[in-house]
């Protein structure tokens, strides 16, 4: 999660890193060379680096880290990225990576933090996530673990780092970096109130709907564009109704993207129509954009499915629910006796084991229960529904994370689609459980989700067919062989003009196939108090990149630079 990434950025170092200008520069590496076939990278490593516990850093630590990433038992989210990479220790301070095929963005993937073999080597791969070492990590980064605090339930509410004076680059000015964790934002005991009262010096994320509450004279709000987008991904494998291109097109035409952006993110972002974002190879404004046209959307669906009025469907569904309730209670509407002596039913079965005759009070209870269930199932403003070729009501399950922004967006999207006669069931899942409950088994018809593209234009992790199973991020389970070939070629070329052409063709194909509806690219916003200086990063690829130049941060008091404590929520 974001907290893990934030802490890792301060505690660990990679072979490469992005500096304050988001330029890729060596970190634990001094230099690198690339073979003529563009498959083998050789790195010379720094020889002046020690771990936080004083042990020397060597090439064995690098090899160990990637061995763990490549171990399927460890279940690393980076497994697919490094699965086929051969890692070789040349000597104590030289490491080599050999790829099966050229991969132009490979260097940017080496910003992953390196682990100390002498700490993690004895821990079984399957227990990496459970070990206590995770809570007291040893790294080579500018800060080291100091202490943590838990409440009575075991919840960690504070995590404190201190400056690592043995850091191989310039040590940070800030002596202590304290992370405080709040269960809520906007209460008397929440994160915003702590910022207002100057109990903390930063807020890691400012939700758009709470920006005005965060804004104060002593608070600086930093607003940055992220290489990230929010989209609706269609799972045609799970929901065959979505296989029809007319259906997917209609669902796209029904959405007012500007309104979704305005009401879910206060308009702070940019509407998009493609996975290729502004500033990336292949991006162009000159693409066919799906219009907001509910009339055209309904016309498309009229060619596919019949309509049924809300009144007709309510009565039909009411009868179904009542029968289900009768079956659950084991009651029937009427019983017919042939002779009192035999006590037989109309079908000849004995009344000793026959269902109970339904009384008028039971009928009233069932009627009331069915009305309650109907009110819960049906959208009051929906004037009509649709039936598929088998006579079933068209119903789609939309799943998203249980956050304010996604709640607002999903509610709007459901309303737009209900205006097409589509029944929409929205499921909200706790963000921390989302991967396990939703993404792992692709448990959705449609998922509303945010994709972080990252520092390079590589679309392979999101659209290549090899990534359609977890932990891959091909959330539409999209399979197109020509797209697969384009993405592989894009990874191999170092010719910028060819890269533009490949991604332009990729974009055209995605727009034609429509495996997803692309909504918007958001803004990331965080806050610091006016005590904190040196925060100059203007471009980031991930929220944790706000720490790219953290060694330059300082706290200024009465005209003097002070190496003193800074805390961030």
Image: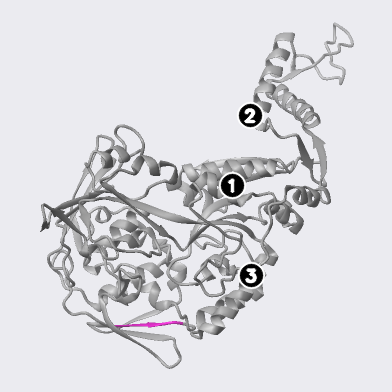
Q: Earlier in the sequence, mark 1 or mark 3?
A: 1
Q: Which residue is mark 3?
A: 286
Q: Which residue is mark 1?
A: 259
Q: Earlier in the sequence, mark 1 or mark 2?
A: 1
Mark 1 and mark 2 residues within 8 Å of each other at the beta carbon = no
Foreground: disc 1 or disc 2 = 1
Task: Tell me the element at label 3.
Answer: loop
Task: Tell me the element at label 1.
Answer: helix
Q: Is residue 74 left or right of residue 435?
A: left
Q: Which residues are magenta?
A: 95-99
Give the number of marks: 3
Q: Is residue 212 left or right of residue 350?
A: left
Q: Is residue 36 left or right of residue 515?
A: left
Q: Quadrant of residue 242?
A: bottom right
Q: Residue furthest top?
A: 340
Position of residue 120 measured from the top left corner of the image (x, y, whole percent): 26, 64
Q: Main secondary structure of the magenta part?
A: strand
Asked whether the viewer can see residue 128, the reply is: no
């Amino acid at each position: 999660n974001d907290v893990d990434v934030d802490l890792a950025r301060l505690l660990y170092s990679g072979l490469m890193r992005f500096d304050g200008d988001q330029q890729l520069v060596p970190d634990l590496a001094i230099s690198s060379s690339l073979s003529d076939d563009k498959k083998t990278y050789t790195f010379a490593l720094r020889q002046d680096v020690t771990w936080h516990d004083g042990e020397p850093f060597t090439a064995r630590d690098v090899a160990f880290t990637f061995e763990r990433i490549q171990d399927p038992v460890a279940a690393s989210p980076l497994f697919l990225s490094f699965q086929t990479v051969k890692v070789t220790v040349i000597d104590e301070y030289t490491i080599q990576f050999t790829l099966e095929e050229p991969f132009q963005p490979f260097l940017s993937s080496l910003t992953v933090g390196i682990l100390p073999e002498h700490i993690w080597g004895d821990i079984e791969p399957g227990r990496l996530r459970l070990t206590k070492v995770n809570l007291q990590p040893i790294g080579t980064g500018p800060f080291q673990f100091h202490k943590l605090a838990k409440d009575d339930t075991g919840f960690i509410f504070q995590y404190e780092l201190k400056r690592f004076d043995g850091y191989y680059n310039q040590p940070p000015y800030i002596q202590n970096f304290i992370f405080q964790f709040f269960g809520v934002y906007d209460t008397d005991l929440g994160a915003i109130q702590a910022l207002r009262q100057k109990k903390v010096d930063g807020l890691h994320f400012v939700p758009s709907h709470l920006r005005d509450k965060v804004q104060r004279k002593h608070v600086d709000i930093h607003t940055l564009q992220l290489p990230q987008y929010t989209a609706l991904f269609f799972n045609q494998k799970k929901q065959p109704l979505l296989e029809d291109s007319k259906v997917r097109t209609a669902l796209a035409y029904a959405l007012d993207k500007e309104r979704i952006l305005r009401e879910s993110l206060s308009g702070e972002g940019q509407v998009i129509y493609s996975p290729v974002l502004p500033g990336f190879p292949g991006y162009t404004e000159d693409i066919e954009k799906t219009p907001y046209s509910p009339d055209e959307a309904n016309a498309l669906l009229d060619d596919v499915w019949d309509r049924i009025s809300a009144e007709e469907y309510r009565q039909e569904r009411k009868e179904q629910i009542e029968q289900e309730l009768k079956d659950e209670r084991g009651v029937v509407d009427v019983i017919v006796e042939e002779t009192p002596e035999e006590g037989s039913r109309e079908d000849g079965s004995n009344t000793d084991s026959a269902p109970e005759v339904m009384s008028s009070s039971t009928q009233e209870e069932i009627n009331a229960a069915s009305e309650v269930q109907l009110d819960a199932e049906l959208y009051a403003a929906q004037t009509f529904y649709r039936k598929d070729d088998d006579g079933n009501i068209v119903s789609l399950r939309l799943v998203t994370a249980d956050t304010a922004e996604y709640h607002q967006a999903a509610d709007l999207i459901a309303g737009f689609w209900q205006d097409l006669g589509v029944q929409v069931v929205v499921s909200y899942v706790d963000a921390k459980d989302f991967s396990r409950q939703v993404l792992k088994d692709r448990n959705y018809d449609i998922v509303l989700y945010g994709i972080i593209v990252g520092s390079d234009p590589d679309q392979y992790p999101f659209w290549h067919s090899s990534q359609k199973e977890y932990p891959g991020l091909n959330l539409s389970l999209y399979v197109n062989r020509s797209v697969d070939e384009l993405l592989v070629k894009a990874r191999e070329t170092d010719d910028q003009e060819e890269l533009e052409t490949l991604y332009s063709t990729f974009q055209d194909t995605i727009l034609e196939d429509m495996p997803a509806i692309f909504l918007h690219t958001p803004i990331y916003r965080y806050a610091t108090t006016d005590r904190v200086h040196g925060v100059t990063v203007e471009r980031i690829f991930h929220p944790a990149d706000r720490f790219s130049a953290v060694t330059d941060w300082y706290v200024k008091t009465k005209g003097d630079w002070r190496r003193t404590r800074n805390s961030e929520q």
